[in-house]
Amino acid sequence: MSDATNLLTGLVMGLNLFALGSSRLPSLIRVAAAQGVLLGLMPLLIEHPNRGMGLVVAAGAVSVKGFLIPFLLRRAMRAASIERDLEPLLGYLPSLLLGAAGTVGAVALARWLPLLPEHRSSLLVAGAMASVLAGFLLLIGRSKAISQVCGYLILENGIYLFGLLLIHSTPLLVEAGILLDLTVAVFVIGIIVDRIQRAFDTLDTRQLTALRE
């Protein structure tokens, strides 16, 4: 793996920590968008015989992850007239500390794993594990639906990084399949967010406990 790939992966890991420490929804959306652009560029930096497919997947990832999904999330945020997640289930400082500890642990674990020689100098494994952890912390630690959607996006970005490890042995259509799953899931989540807003006039998912048959 190239130094440029490691640089982009390091930036993704840094954005994970920024997301965990931020209460502002616009900042979370910008983090998800920035990660989408960075991840979309990575297939172009990895040598692969099918460069045409790499270009298609990169363009699709940048378009959907970097622009379309953030646009939809900003639209939902404006419709709900909310910009902060002020009452998280898990505080911002504990989230940030857990994320930092998880990132350090991911780097250490990646060095310990029996990876292929070409992957030993790569940050993809560490970045993937750190992103999955950060996304999981956002999913369980935030109370607003939009924050949780951003957590899902970051978690999926970690899965995408894992997929890049197999880019030499599996077709890039695997990455396209992950991207399609993400797109469908976000549209479904968008519908759910809209229904929560209409029913409770809030995006606080804790209100769902008030539902009765």
Image (cartoon, rainbow, N blue to C red):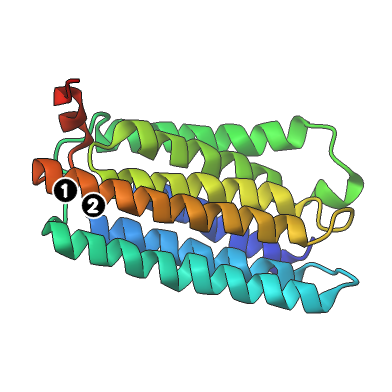
Residue 114 in picture, x, y percent from top left: 85, 33
Specify the amino acid type for callout 2.
Asp
Check the image and name the residue furthest to the top: 213
Check the image and name the residue furthest to the front: 213
SS at circle 2:
helix
- Viewer-side residue, 190 vs 144: 190
Left or right of 206 on screen, residue 63:
right
Q: Quadrant of residue 116?
A: top right
| Placement of the N terminus among the 4 image quadrants | bottom right
- Viewer-side residue, 88 vs 176: 176
Left or right of 95 on screen, residue 36:
right
Q: Residue at x 68, y 31 (%)?
A: 109
Q: Residue at x 64, y 43 (%)?
A: 126
- Viewer-side residue, 94 vs 197: 197
Residue 177 in picture, x, y percent from top left: 67, 56
Specify the amino acid type for callout 1.
Gln
Left or right of 73 on screen, residue 87:
left
Residue 141 in picture, x, y percent from top left: 31, 32
The answer to whether 200 is drawn above or below residue 19 in the figure is above
Give the Cα separation between the discs numbered 2 and 1. Answer: 5 Å
Confirm whether residue 103 shows in the render: yes
| Placement of the C terminus among the 4 image quadrants | top left
Q: Residue at x 51, y 44 (%)?
A: 155
The answer to whether 153 is drawn above or below residue 2 in the figure is above
SS at circle 1:
helix
Residue 166 in picture, x, y percent from top left: 81, 51
Q: Which mark is residue 194?
A: 2
Task: Name the residue carrying label 1.
Answer: 197
**Number of numbered discs:** 2
Q: Are marks 2 and 1 in contact (CB under 8 Å)?
A: yes
